[in-house]
Amino acid sequence: MGNILIVIGFMIISGNTTGIILGSLGFMAIYRLIVFSEERFLTEKFGQAYLDFCADVPRWLPRFKGLRETISNYDFDWPAVAVKEYGTLFTSLMISLGLISWKLKLTYSLDQNKIPVIAATILIVATYAIVRFLKKTERLKSMR
């Protein structure tokens, strides 16, 4: 679900109504095929245990029952997010920055905003490089 929201967000940033509709529908169709492929693999690997899990957990829309209790008893592990998701975060931020830069260019205002765009690019790339270095040298690890 998160990937679908990310891609739809990119399309909204683009601002092209036709692209938003067709791109969102196309991505959701492709993503549905990916999910079905993963489910087939997991069913073959885990059998009935996975089928039981699927019967208890909705595929597309989350259930919010019990969310407050789960969150109140959960210690969020920022290092785990950094270690596992730094590539996704980097890509999402760079695509968003690219789309915003493109829109600025279309409105002839990229020249007036070069410094913030360059600063944001440097900040995103530097953060990615630091997290990647810390992960690869095993200085950044999950707390669990």
Image: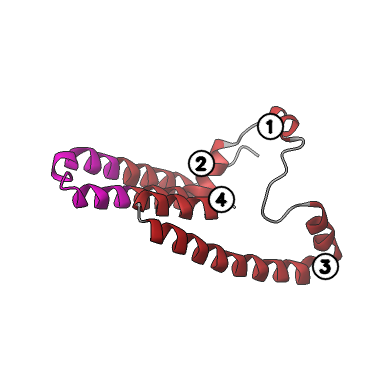
Mark closer to the chain start, 2 or 3: 3
Q: CA distance from mark 2 to mark 4?
A: 24 Å
- Category of crowding for the residue at label 2, using alpha-carbon neighbours closer than 10 angstroms: few (below 14), some (14–19), many (at least 20): some
Residue 45 in the image: state x and y as whole percent.
76, 69
Magenta: main secondary structure equals helix
Q: Residue at x 64, y 65 (%)?
A: 35
In front of the other: 101 or 86: 101
Q: Which mark is residue 2?
A: 4
Specify the segment rendered in magenta.
97-122
In front of the other: 88 or 5: 5
Q: CA distance from mark 3 to mark 1?
A: 30 Å
Labels 2 & 1 near each other (Cβ < 8 A): no
Q: Residue at x 45, y 52 (%)?
A: 87
Labels 1 & 4 near each other (Cβ < 8 A): no
At label 4, the amino acid type is Gly
Q: Nearer the viewer, mark 3 or mark 4?
A: 4
Q: Which mark is residue 71?
A: 1
